[in-house]
Amino acid sequence: MLFAHLSDVHLGFQKHESLQKIEQQVFEKCLDECITRKVDFILIPGDLFHVNIPEMRVQKFAFAKFRQVYDAGIPIYVVYGSHDFSPVANSVIDLLAEIGYITKVTRATSHENNTISLECIVDEKTRVKITGLSGLKVGKDREWYEKLDRDSLEAESGFKIFLFHGGILDMKTDTGMDGDQMPLSLLPKGFSYYAGGHMHKFNHQSFDGYSNVVYPGTPFAGYHADLEDNANGQKRGFVLVEFEDVVKSVKFVEIENTLYEIIKVDANNRKAESINQELLEKTRDIDPTNKVVIITVKGEMATGKTADVDISTIRDELNSRNAMVVNVSKNGLTSKEYSITEAKGNNKEEIETNVFSENIGQLRFDYPELLSEQGIKLAKKLLSELGQPVLINERKNEYIPRIRDNALAILGLDDAS
Ligand SMILES: [Mn+2]
């Protein structure tokens, strides 16, 4: 017997048209593979969609593919992830469950003694017992796990699978993901397979009492950093598990997505000019045609502004040579010239004033109103304006121009648009 384990598809994450196409193709290829290989069922522990209600384009191809899987007689078992969760069950997953294309496995009951018990559902064809918990937003899942009646789950006999969505401390997986990681000991022991979601890289480990704790990782990309990992050679796909009364094999099935080029430049102790030179040379060394090109510039520049690192020329150059997408990461780029000195104060107001006073001396401008006491006053006004929250019922396209116009007015500039 055979089941598939897929997670963190994040349908609807991609904004660029070419990447949207790949996102869709990868998803369809994964499920096509499941159909071709005649799996008995499919597990998806969360983040199937990037948001709880994705745009119609995404829903359309997702429903079409799930229909094919349904027609092939393959059940799909899911829990929510942190992305597709909706507290009032207003998620596209709930629609898919309503029409019977997928089955939500969490059957939880809260008891008076403050515990939560879970009931297993039984897969009709294989008699496998399946249960699990969703990953909710902001660390609420930990609370559920702490209340979980593990004993009754551990007493269940037969081949059983636990679905979960979250990081496990014991797995020593990649950090940088949102949310807390929890200890493995919060999960019930003795299951045959632990189907994990949330971590975006494939990982398969076994522990005392916990065999086959597995994350398939995202089949393409659900965060910007995933594309960079892909460019660095990270394999993507899903997991196939062969089993009888125990797990016989856990295989990672690679699904190819697209071609990449990565350009890395170390900016440490350098000037913008030499960084730009290296960027240009490295750009000329690659063939970007129909590829996703990732550019990362990291380190602390010796002088100058980080804005002097000229990405737009590089981007134009790559686009003129038919790059599919150019993604630039300058998050790790800083400059000595603009390092901010900390300052103390008794309250927020004082700290802000002191930080500006400590640092304004570093600036070289031809405009006296941007310097010394005048400059500090202006900076404080601007900061307070930029910190204004969105008003109740105010739309984003009303909020942004309001803040921008007020900020420009503070600077004594006319709105150029
Ligand atoms: Mn995810």
Image (cartoon, grey):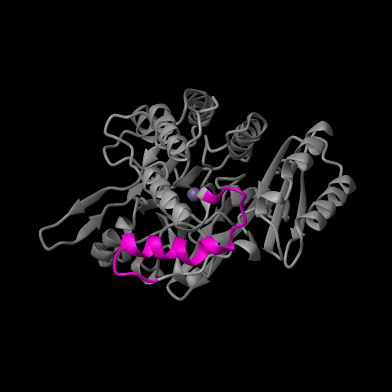
Residue 185: x percent and y percent?
Answer: 37, 71
In the rendered image, the vertical position of residue 170 relative to residue 106, given as above or below: below
Q: Which residue is rendered at x = 68% and y = 55% of the image?
A: 234
Residue 389: x percent and y percent?
Answer: 33, 41
Q: In the figure, residue 303 lies in which quadrant? A: bottom right
The C terminus: image quadrant: top right
Asked if residue 130 lies left or right of residue 303, the reply is left
Residue occupying the far bottom of the picture: 208
Of 117 and 156, which appears nearest the observer?
117
Q: Which residue is rendered at x = 20% and y = 51% of the image?
A: 109
Residue occupying the far left of the picture: 112
Of 384 and 93, which appears nearest the observer?
384
In the rendered image, the vertical position of residue 173 relative to residue 216, given as above or below: below
Assign the magenta stretch its main secondary structure.
helix
Total marks in image: 0
Q: Is residue 192 visible?
A: no
In the rendered image, the vertical position of residue 392 relative to residue 187, given as above or below: above
Q: Is residue 356 visible?
A: yes
Which residues are the magenta region? 344-368
